[in-house]
Image (spheres, rainbow, N blue to C red):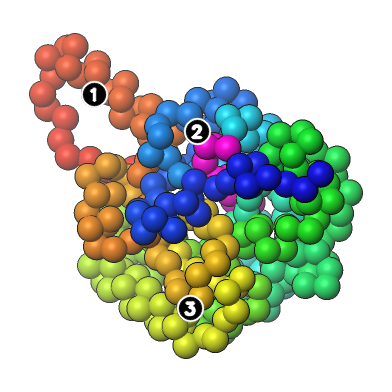
Amino acid sequence: MSATTSALAHPLLTAFRASKPAFGAWLTLPGFLAARTAAAASPHLSWVVIDCEHGATALQPGAAESVHAIAGLGPSAPSTIVRIPATGACADGSAGWQIKYVLDAGAKGVLVPMVSTAAQAASVVAAARFPPQGVRGFGNPFTQLAWGPPGEVSAADYLARANASVLVLVQIETRAGVDNLDSILSVDGLDGVFIGPYDLSLSLGFPAPSPDPHPEVETVIQRILAASHAKGKKWCVPPTRLLVVLVGIRVGALHRLTVDGLSYSAIYCTSGAQSARRAKEGFDMINVTSDSGAMAESIARNLAEAAGDAGQGAKGFSY
């Protein structure tokens, strides 16, 4: 049985087609219920990132459990992207086993941090694509269950659609990554790059955002964003391929679109107010909060109100 449209639905894709900002959340806490609760928290949530690099979710089996917990919410479930722990050089294929675990778990995409060269990006793409586009192996019995209900999405459906549906993202958060941006963007099969202002700020000799990046770092972000969009506009791509440009403190998730010649921008924020400002600026994909950050902020605010403490200032450094 071939896959149905509802089984393959992606709220993130729907938001882009409707020209609406796609809001997301960052998941740092482990566990089935934590992931499912966060993913079900708001109808405005289009995507989530499960963070296995700096978050507390283990790559195996934690990521798979979180992915399937979210997928169990049905067709309206937010798209899931998993950030793997691998950092630094990966042109030798050393990140391949982590990418395999994530995609076999049923994630809609993978994010690889600290990629600084085109060779590293090409290795990531190869690990995420089935032949002939890549070297990914096939055989996990659970993957398709995260893409739709049993009987609606088969293993054969997944195999036929994965190369055109799985999102491959790399993070640009080092000086070398900035210097090599043009060659990284030229890697065939790479869906997008993501600028991480926390690590990028440190790499450039500036403090971490608190909550906004240093003005000089913001200048670099805007310059890279403009260059990335220009690169996307220069490309002559078929309708089933699209360069997606992600700019933010952390990554979000983008599904490959069927719109020719366009590129999209994304940014990570730490509050609703900050996100609203970025939406007005024209960002397509905006992270609003993290699970741990939202929980801590809500507990602190409510306890302060109960204790009559009006001294909580503006939100500063947070992650």
Picture layout, residue 163 above or below residue 119: above
Sequence-wise, the earlier of marks 2 and 3 is 2
Circles 3 and 1: CB distance less than 8 Å?
no
- Closer to us: 239 or 85: 239
Q: Which of the two marks, 1 or 2, is nearer to us in this view?
A: 2
Where, by quadrant of the figure, is residue 313 drawn?
top left
State the residue position of label 3.
Answer: 261
Sequence-wise, the earlier of marks 1 and 2 is 2
| Secondary structure under the numbered disc 1 in the rendered image | helix
Q: Which of the two marks, 2 or 3, is nearer to us in this view?
A: 3
- Using the rendered image of the protein, determine whether residue 173 is visible from the camera's viewpoint: no
Please state the extent of the stretch shown in magenta in the rendering: 75-85
Picture layout, residue 57 above or below residue 135: above
Q: Mark 1: which amino acid?
A: Arg
Residue 301's disc is 1
Question: Residue 88 location, x and y as percent?
Answer: 62, 65
3D distance between C-alphas at marks 2 and 3: 31 Å
Is 80 included in the stretch rendered in magenta?
yes
Q: Is residue 281 left or right of residue 137?
A: left
Question: Residue 17 location, x and y as percent?
Answer: 44, 58
Disc 1 residue crowd, few under 14, some 14–19, many 20+, Cα 10 Å:
some
- Closer to us: 156 or 268: 156
State the residue position of label 2.
Answer: 39
Picture layout, residue 56 above or below residue 283: above
| Secondary structure under the numbered disc 2 in the rendered image | helix
